Image (cartoon, rainbow, N blue to C red):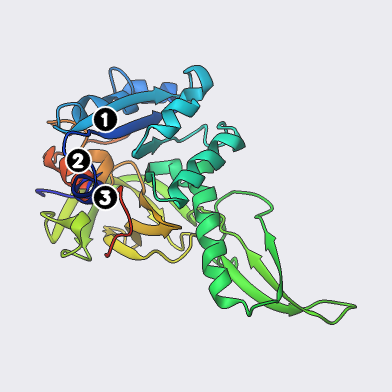
Amino acid sequence: MTRAPILFLFTLFVACASPAAPIRVVVWDEQASAAKKAYTNSIGEHIAEYLRTLPDLSVKSVSLNDPDQGLSNDTINNCDVLIWWSHTKNRAVPDDKVNQIVSRIKDGSLSLIVLHSALTSKVFIESMNERARIDAAKLIPAGMKTEYILPKVYKDPLPTDPITPRVDIVTNWPEHNTLALVYLPICEITGWREDGKPSHVTTMMPEHPIARGVDKEFDIAQTEVYLEPFHVPKPDAVIFHEKYSSGEEFRTGMLWTVGKGKVFGVDGETRIVELAISQSCGGGFFVTFHCPPILWKTVFSEFPVVFPLSS
C-alpha cells in the first residue's frame, strides 16, 4: 500500500487559505492504560509525533487527562482537523464540548476523523444524529409533526433489530394525526471478534481523493472482525471495504457530509488511517501491520477543511 486518507483536508484548504498558514491539527486521545502495552507514550502522541514530521502542519496532542479534558475553547476554536481516538471512555466528554465541536463541523470550519471504537464516542454519535436529522428532513413532508427518538441504550444491536437511523410515518392516537418518528442512530456494530486472522481490503473508490495512491486491493495479516449492519446514516462514500477470512464484510472507510463539514470514519484497530502513524507503522492496539507513512500525508492533503467538497 502506498497512500490513503488525512492530507485531502489540506489540498482545498491550502488553495483557499494563506499559503503560509499551517493546517491546525488536534489529536484527542483518552489515554487508556491498556494502550501502554503497545505504545511507549500514548496512541494520540504517537500519531502526533509522526504528523509533526510533515510540512505545513501545526499539531497539538491533547487528552482526557488534560485541563478541560483537552478541549478548551481555545483548542476547539483553533482547530481545522480533529483526530479522535477513544475506546473505553467514550461517554466521558461533556455534552457542551461535544455540541461545540459538532457546531464547528456543521459550519464547515472543522473536519473530524474518527478512529476505531470512537464510533461510539459522543462526538461521533452527535455528528451522526445531526446527519440523520438532515436526511430525515428530506423525507418528511413539510408541516408534518416530527419526533426524534434517541436509542434507549447504546450497545451492540442484534442482527434482527430494526436498523437505525430510520423514519416511520404513523397515525397518532387518539388524535389520528400523521406523525413522523425519526429513530436516531445507535452508532454501534452488530458484533465483533478479536480473531487476529487476516482480512482483505478493497479500495472501492480508487478515484476518490482520499484513496489517491492506495492500492486497489491489499491484505491485513491480523485484525479484529467488525460485523454489519453498522447502525449509522448512509454515508456519502464507502471508500474502503473489508472482507475477513471468516467471510464477514465491513465498510471500513466511510465519509459523511454533516452540514458544511466532513466526517471520516475508520473503524477497528487495524484500519486504514490508524495504522499509518509512524515511519515503521508498527504496533497496532492489538496487532501490528506494516505500511508506509505516506498514508497520513495523503489523508491530510485530501480531507478538505474548506468546503464544499465534490466527491
What is the C-alpha distance between the residues marked 1 and 2? Answer: 9 Å
The three-letter code of the residue at mark 1 reads Ile
Quarter of the figure with the C terminus: bottom left
Element type at mark 3? loop
Residue 47's tag is: 1
Foreground pick, 242 / 66: 66
In the rendered image, residue 277, in percent from the top left (x then y), is placed at 22, 34
For residue 62, side relative to residue 155 (left or right): left
- Percent position (x, y) of residue 178? 76, 80
For residue 140, above or below residue 205: below
Q: Which residue in the structure is indicated by mark 2?
A: 296
Please, what is the three-letter code of the amino acid marked with disc 3? Phe
1 or 2: tag closer to the N-terminus: 1
State the image quarter where residue 78 is shown: top left
Vertical position of residue 73 compared to residue 177: above or below: above
Does residue 178 appear to the left or right of 22 in the view shown? Answer: right
Sequence-earlier tag: 2 or 3? 2
Q: Neighbour class for label 1 at 10 Å: few (<14), some, many (≥20)?
A: many
Residue 261 shows in the view: yes
Dot 3 corresponds to which residue? 303
Name the residue: 43% across, 33% down. Answer: 77
Dot 1 and dot 2 residues touching (CB under 8 Å): yes
Residue occupying the point 22% across, 57% down: 201
Provide the secondary structure element on which disc 2 rests.
Answer: helix
* Residue at the spot 43% in from the left edge and 42% down from the top edge: 117
Which numbered disc, 3 or 1, marks the residue closer to the eye? 3
Which residue is farthest right? 174
Q: CA distance from mark 2 to mark 3?
A: 11 Å
Q: Earlier in the sequence, mark 3 or mark 1?
A: 1
Instruction: Out of 6 and 280, give the one closest to the viewer.
Output: 6
Crowding around mark 2 (Cα neighbors within 10 Å: few <14, some 14 to 19, many 20+) is many
**Residue 195 percent location from the top left of the image:** 34, 46
